[in-house]
Image: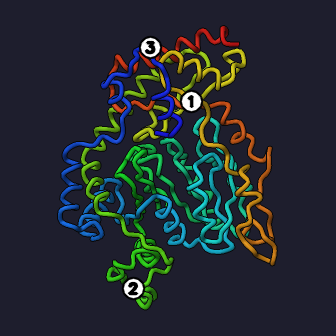
Amino acid sequence: MTWRVRFWLFKVVPRWSPISAKQKEFFHWPIVTEEDEQAVLEVLRADTMSDDSITKQFEAEYARYNGRKFALSYPNGTLALQVALWAAGLREGDEMICLSVTYWVSAMPAITLGASVVFADCEANYLCIDPGDIERHIGPRTKAILVVHYCGHPVDMDRIQPIADKHGLTVIEDVSHAHGTLYQGRMTGTFGRVAAMSMMAGKSFPIGEGGMLISDDPDIIQNALAFAHYRRHNELTRADLKPFAEIPLGGIKGRLNQMCSAMGRVQLKYYPQRITAIQDAINRFWDFLEGDPGLCPHRPDPESGSTMGGWYSPLGHYVPEELGGLPVEKFAAAVQAEGSVSSPGCNSPLHLHPVFNDAVIYQHGGQPTCIAHSDRDVRQGPGSLPVSEQVMQRTLHIPYFKHDWPEQVAQHAAAYRKVARQAGKLL
């Protein structure tokens, strides 16, 4: 759940005010039970927070759940993604293509490695990277395509890999929004050479704080171990890496606290049934609103075999022209006044942010710059990614239900329906 959704949940004065315990439970996340608490207490009492026995069990179970051979855990998703990029070969002076409408963590780990990020536009219906906009951004330094399964919606992976193969690029998946999401029946995170994801408390798969890297490629895992898991260098089998044992090549400690690992093992046991309830509830919400003006669901075709996983930070498409041009801000405020949860927009496009245009990050060629190397200016100004630049006005957050309680879902959907059908009064 994003901060905006959480904020409005407690600031709205709902029609079923005051907020009942049942309403709080409807939105509360993560779901923590005595089983979670006992697992964490066992680690505390055994004084094994910084060991790795439970962590290795969690990694093995998480790899099996995703259908991958290997998994390595990290203290947070940002580090997991940084290691994934380095393990896949991204280095100083390289370029990586990434979605612009995403959280900064999808892009900034490349900067920490001395690489540059070139942003591609999003596809209007899915809000994921538009495969048709990738090739125009490929240059001689491009090494990777990072795909983000944004807000739980799977990327059109059938169109991504042929582009990567044509240009000799590595596909890396950011699955932070899409734990358990299926693309045509196959788990996201299993398409690229490597995938990484956040497991912080607000994500659909929460372990308190943490990250994970998954892959079928043993070279990726060997590189990842060498980069940040110095206490596990006994697992290095490649001759070129063994001489560096005991000191992490990245100068980083990547160990996950075992209290989080213990919670992760419990959360994973119940995750499939919990996300089924979330999917049923949000699909019920959208089915209720079918045919109403101004709103379209952000979800794949139910017949495609694709799902939204835990439906992290659920969005709807807003169509202002069907509501007389009513701004999304006014629509969301009216929904809040009716007692439901809504906030306008999604992530702002990164390609317009000053960090990617004006910040002094490098000193290449003696000149302070935000670009890794000066032979190509990869900065992208206003108008360069037109779909991404309009998405804030054409999306809104909807309630992030954690249980499929039909009566409560219908109450929230009715608030949206009332505003949509009477939008003319707000003009």
Q: What's the CA distance linking mark 2 and mark 3?
A: 60 Å
Q: What's the CA distance linking mark 3 and mark 1?
A: 18 Å
Amino acid identity at mark 3: Arg
Discs 3/1, front:
3
Name the residue: 49% across, 66% down: 84
Percent across and percent down for residue 294 are: 61, 20
* Most foreground residue, 390 or 194: 390
- Seen in the picture, residue 414 relative to 74 is either above or below; the reply is above
- Seen in the picture, residue 55 relative to 197 is either above or below; the reply is below
Amino acid identity at mark 2: Glu
Looking at the rendered structure, the number of numbered marks drawn on it comes to 3
- Seen in the picture, residue 229 relative to 278 is either above or below; the reply is below
Percent across and percent down for residue 301 are: 49, 32
- Seen in the picture, residue 247 relative to 93 is either above or below; the reply is below
Q: What residue did someone put label 2 on?
A: 246
Secondary structure under tag 1 reads strand
Q: What's the CA distance linking mark 1 and mark 2?
A: 48 Å
Q: Is residue 224 left or right of residue 418?
A: left
Q: What residue did someone put label 3 on?
A: 15
Q: Is residue 369 left or right of residue 152?
A: right
Q: What residue did someone put label 1 on?
A: 343
